Image (tube, rainbow, N blue to C red):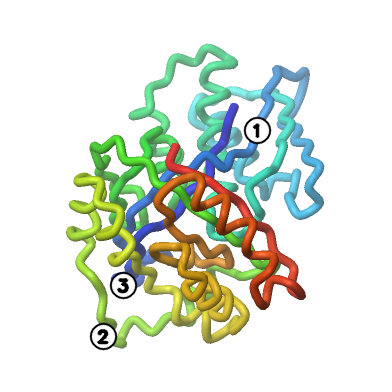
Amino acid sequence: MKSPAKLNLFLDVLHKRPDGYHDIETIFERIDLCDEIVLTKADKGINIACGNKDVPTDRTNLIHKAIKSLSVHLKKDINVNIILKKKIPVAAGLGGGSGNAAAALIGINRLFDLGLTNTQLMPLAEKIGADVPFFLLDEPFALGRGKGEDLEVLRTDLVLWHVIVRINLKISTKDIYSALDLGLTAHKPDVKIIHNSIINKDIAAISKQLYNRLEDVVFEKHREISDLKAVLKDSGLGKGVLLSGSGPAIFCITDNRQEAVGLKDRLASLAPFKKADYQVFVAKTL
């Protein structure tokens, strides 16, 4: 199974919910930066193997949670071996774990010929994590409301090219949301504008409407991420630059693949890239 990452082209946080989550408005974009998951039937248990030491292989892994929830739903054991090959940076705001969970649900459904529809799998996805339903949707763009599970597909064949830079920091999404002052009146663009710009394939307008309510909190706690965004903006090559999710990954939009590759190649010569520890990716809409 290919398990893609996501970017948030727009993210507004409206208020806190009784269940501990927050109501949001977000524009999801699925991108072709992908993990790979290999599923095979096993004699016993849910057995996860991964070469990345930052990825848990016990029941805290979202793949394990997804398969366990499916097992409970079906009222029978699911015995499976999973090999997870990570390419998406861990805990970067790119939805790697959520995508893995969705891919596991789809993969188990196929492997064991369960015959479940996406409509039947969606309630399970919602319980696992806020971003999991988007990956289960299997669409390039969607508007997400509620905690992210109330999804509206954006019908367009738009393909965006990106450079994604992940500074090697660990950020707690829970801590970022907890530190957000929802009482502050923030100036923000209307999600409908970027929604329509995506439908109309207007890259310049999309770039101007990029928005993430979490940026101020993340930048206050981690100045180096703010500096990274400034470097990307000042490079003159990216049309719009934004933090994805709660970070620490920053992405920009470019006109095409050639421009994206050129920016990636140039980053090594720009401060602070000479000294700090970064991962840089070129990706497009999937």
Front-most of 146 and 35? Answer: 35
Tag 3 secondary structure: strand
Residue 279 visible in the snapshot: yes
The location of residue 130, given as percent across then percent down, is 44, 52
Q: Which residue is located at x 39 percent, y 65 percent? A: 240
Front-most of 17 and 13? Answer: 13
**Mark closer to the chain start, 1 or 3:** 3
The location of residue 155, given as percent across then percent down, is 23, 37
Q: Which residue is mark 3?
A: 15
- Rounded to the nearest angstrom, the CA distance separating label 3 from label 2 is 12 Å
Left or right of residue 149: residue 264: right
Q: Nearer the viewer, mark 3 or mark 2?
A: 2
The location of residue 82, given as percent across then percent down, is 71, 30
Residue 36 bears which disc, if any? 1
Q: Which residue is located at x 62 percent, y 62 percent? A: 266
The location of residue 267, given as percent across then percent down, is 63, 64
State which quarter of the image contains the N terminus: top right
Left or right of residue 216: residue 274: right
Q: In the picture shown, does residue 79 fall above or below 63?
A: above
Front-most of 116 and 277? Answer: 277
**Mark closer to the chain start, 1 or 2:** 1
Residue 196 bears which disc, if any? none
Q: Nearer the viewer, mark 1 or mark 3?
A: 1
Tag 1 secondary structure: strand
Residue 175 visible in the snapshot: no
Q: Which residue is mark 2?
A: 185
Please name the amino acid that badge 1 sits on. Glu
**Mark closer to the chain start, 3 or 2:** 3
Q: In the picture shown, does residue 116 fall above or below 285?
A: above
- Rounded to the nearest angstrom, the CA distance separating label 1 from label 2 is 42 Å
Task: Tell me where residue 23 sits by quadrant.
Answer: bottom left
State which quarter of the image contains the C terminus: top left
